[in-house]
Image (spheres, helix red, strand yellow):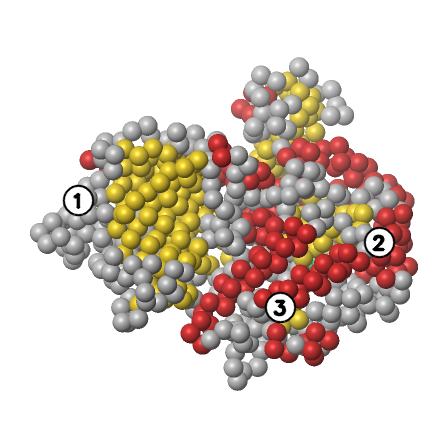
Amino acid sequence: MSIYFDKKDNVFYLSTVNTSYIIKITDLGHIINLHYGGYIKHINEKNLYIEMPRSFSPNPVPGRMGYSLDTLRLEYPSYGNSDFRMPAYQVEVENGSRISDLKYKSHKIFKGKNKLNGLPATYVENTNEATTLEIELYDNVIKLKVILSYTVFEAYDVITRTTKFVNEGFNNIKLLRAMSMSIDFKDDDFCLLQLSGAWARERHIFKHSLVPGLQGINSTRGVSSPQQNTFICLARKNTDEYNGEAYGFNLVYSGSFAANVEVDQYNNTRVSMGINPFDFSWLLKQNESFQTPEVVMVYSDRGFNHMSQIYHKLYRERLCKGKFRDKVRPVLINNWESTYFNFNEEKLLNIAKEAAKIGIELFVLDDGWFGKRDNDTNSLGDWYVNKNKLPHGLNWLSKEINNLGLKFGIWIEPEMISPDSNLYRKHPDWCLCVPDRSCTQSRNQLILDLSRDDVCNYIVDSVSNILNSANISYVKWDMNRHLTEIGSRELPPGNQKEVAHRYVLGLYKIMNQITTKFPDVLFEGCSGGGGRFDPGILYYMPQIWVSDDTDAIERLKIQYGTSIVYPIITMCNHFTDVPNHQIGRITPINTRANVAFSGCLGFEIDFNKLDYAEKDEIKKQIQLYKENRSIINFGNFYRLINPFENNDGAWMFVSKDKKEFLLFYFKILSEANKPLKYIKLKGLEEKFNYKLENSEEIFGGDELQKAGLFIPDNFVDFQSILLRFKAIN
Ligand code: DGJ
C-alpha cells in the first residue's frame, strides 16, 4: 500500500518505489513534515519530531515553549498567527481580518486520482496506478475548509500535490494567496536550479546555493514564458547528472506563478509553488470552491538525469493524452523561415513537392494565410482564408498537398486580436483592458479576454470552422505576447484580480473543447518559439516548438535545458538554412540534422534551393531518423556532456530493451593539441556486446560505461557525429 496511516503516532507514510514522504498530525491538529526523500520503511517519530524552545518564536499553548508555528516544519502554513515565514495561503474576511488557522479535521485514502475541475493534471488509466490521500483542514472561525491532496504514483516514483478551498460559512472569503503546495525541509544544504531565459534563449540552466531568507522565481506575465519555466529543483551541492539528491517541483500551469524558497533562522528550507499571489485574489462566496493547479514532485537520489527520466516517463504516459500520445510523430516541413509572409499557392506547392520527394510526411502552412495578413500588423482574429494569397482556398490547397503524399497542417494564434482586424472593428470590447486607459500593444496585437464565455465561444467556433473547412491533420497553436492591462469589462471591480487566472482557465476550456472535438488532429504548442513549454499545455498538446532560435549550436543549450523536465518526444526541432536566420552562423548539414533529430524532426527550408548532393544527404538523414524515431521518441534519454559548461556536448538515446542506442556528440569550437576524449556511456546492459554500425568495432556494455568510448576528436568548429550501436548477442 503506497499510503499508510499509523493511527498510534498519527503519521502518514506516502511511499513510491524509492521515495518516502512522511507527515504527521500534531496533537494540536497541525500537519507537519517529518521526511521527504529516500524510502524509509518506518520512522521513530520522536527522532524526527522535536519540540525545541526558541526565543521570539510564539507558542499557541502558553507554557509549551517548544511548540511554535514559527519553527515547525509545516505542510500548509497560515499567515498571522505566529509563523513569520512565507505562508501557503492567506484570506481576507468581511471584518477585515487576514488571519486564519487550519487544523486537521479528517482524512481519506483512496485508490486512483480525481480529475481537477477545469485544470490540466496528471491522470491514471486505472485506479491501481495511484493512491490519493486527502487531508481536510478546517478553520472553525471562518468556516473555511481546505483539502490537501497528495497522489502517489508508486511505480512512476512521483508524488503530486494540490489544494482546494471551500467556503462553508455565510460570509464571503477573499483568497489573497493560494499556493498549490508548501513543504519544509529540515536543512538548507541545497542549490536551487532553475530554467530561465528570454525569447530565443529558452530554458537555460542556472544554479546557485541557497542563502538565508527568500529566493526563488516568479512570473507576472499572465501566461507561461521563456523568462521563467514553472520548474525548480533543490539539489545537494555535490549533485551532478548521475549522483546525489535532487528534488524537482513542476507546476502544471500556464499563467503567472511563483516558486518560493525560504531559508529560515534555523536553516529549515521552505518551498512553495503555485499561482503568483502578486495581483491575485479570488472571491469565495458561500459554498464556492477554488482549486489550485497541481505540482508534480520528483525525488532522485541518482542525480539530475534520473529525475529527468522520471518526469519524462510520467509526462509521456500520464500527462500527455490522446491519439498521438503513443505514436511516433511525423517529420514535417514548415514554410515559415523559407517564405515568412511572402508566399502564394505556387510557392507553397513547390516547397511541398520537393519535400515529398525526400521523405517529409506533413506540410505546415505557417502565419499569413488568413485575413489580409502580409505582415504582423493585422488580421489576428479574422480566421478565414486570405484569397489574395490562396485564391483556391484551404480545402483545395490541403487536397493538392495530400495528393503529393503529405498531410496538411496550419498555424493559428487564436488568443490574439489585431487592432486592424474585422473582429476588432466589430468587438472592440473583447480585449483585455482597464477603464480609462489604452491597451499596450506588443507585436502590434492585443489579447482577447478569455475570462469571457462569449469570447471563448467565438474562438472555439472560428477554429472549428477552419478545421472543418479542409483536410487539416495538424495545428500549430502560437501565442506571441504577454498580458498587460489585465482587466475584464465583464467582471465587477472587486473581482478584477481574478482575471489573469480566469484567462488561463478560459484557455484551458477552449483547448479542451477544440482538442476533444478534433481528436485526429495533432496539436503543437508554440509561443514566439518555446515560451509556452509547460506541463499545462502538454496536457492538451503532446508536442511544443522549442525555440525560434534554430541555430544548431545555440540549440544545444536550449534542448539540454528543456530535457531537464520535458520528454524528448514533446520537443519539436527544425533543421533550417544557413547562414542561420537568427544569428548568421554557418553550421554543417549533419550537425543541423543531428540537433534537430533529438526530438520531433521538422524542416524550415525550401529544398528547391539546395543542390542535388545536399538534397540527397538530407534524404538519407530523414531515412535514418525514421529508422530510429521510436528510440528517440520513446527510449531513455541520457545527458552526457553539458554544453553550458564545456566546449562540446553529448547525449544518447537507449531503446527500452537496451539492445540499441544512439550517441550524439557535438563539438562547439575546435581546439589544437587536445587531450584524448573518452565519454562514459549510460543506460546500457553491461553484459551485452554492442557493435558500432558501419564498422567491425565491438564494445562491451561494461567497457562503454566504465572505461568509456574513445571519440576521435579531430573536429572542426560545429562538427558533430551520430553513432549507432546494436547489441549482437
Ligand atoms: C512565432 C513562431 O515561433 C514562429 O515559428 C512563427 O510561427 C511565427 N510566430 C509566425 O508569426
Kind of residue at badge 3:
Val
Image coordinates for residue 186, horizontal then vertical, percent: 29, 44
Which one is in front in this view, the residue at disc 3 or the one at disc 2?
3
* Kind of element beneath mark 3: helix
Q: Residues within 10 Å of mark 1 (few under 14, many from 20)?
A: some
Q: Residue furthest top?
A: 729
**In which quadrant of the rendered image does the C terminus lie?**
top right
Distance, label 2 to label 1, CA atoms, is 70 Å
Local crowd at mark 3 within 10 Å, few (<14), some, or many (≥20)?
some
Q: Are marks 3 and 2 in contact (CB under 8 Å)?
A: no
* Amino acid of disc 1: Glu
Residue 444: name its quadrant.
bottom right
SS type, badge 1: loop
Q: Which mark is residue 698?
A: none
Q: In the rendered view, tell whether residue 583 sits above or below residue 440.
A: above
Residue position marked by numbered label 2 in the rendering = 398
Residue identified by numbered label 1: 51
Do we see residue 527 in this rendering?
Answer: yes
- SS at badge 2: helix
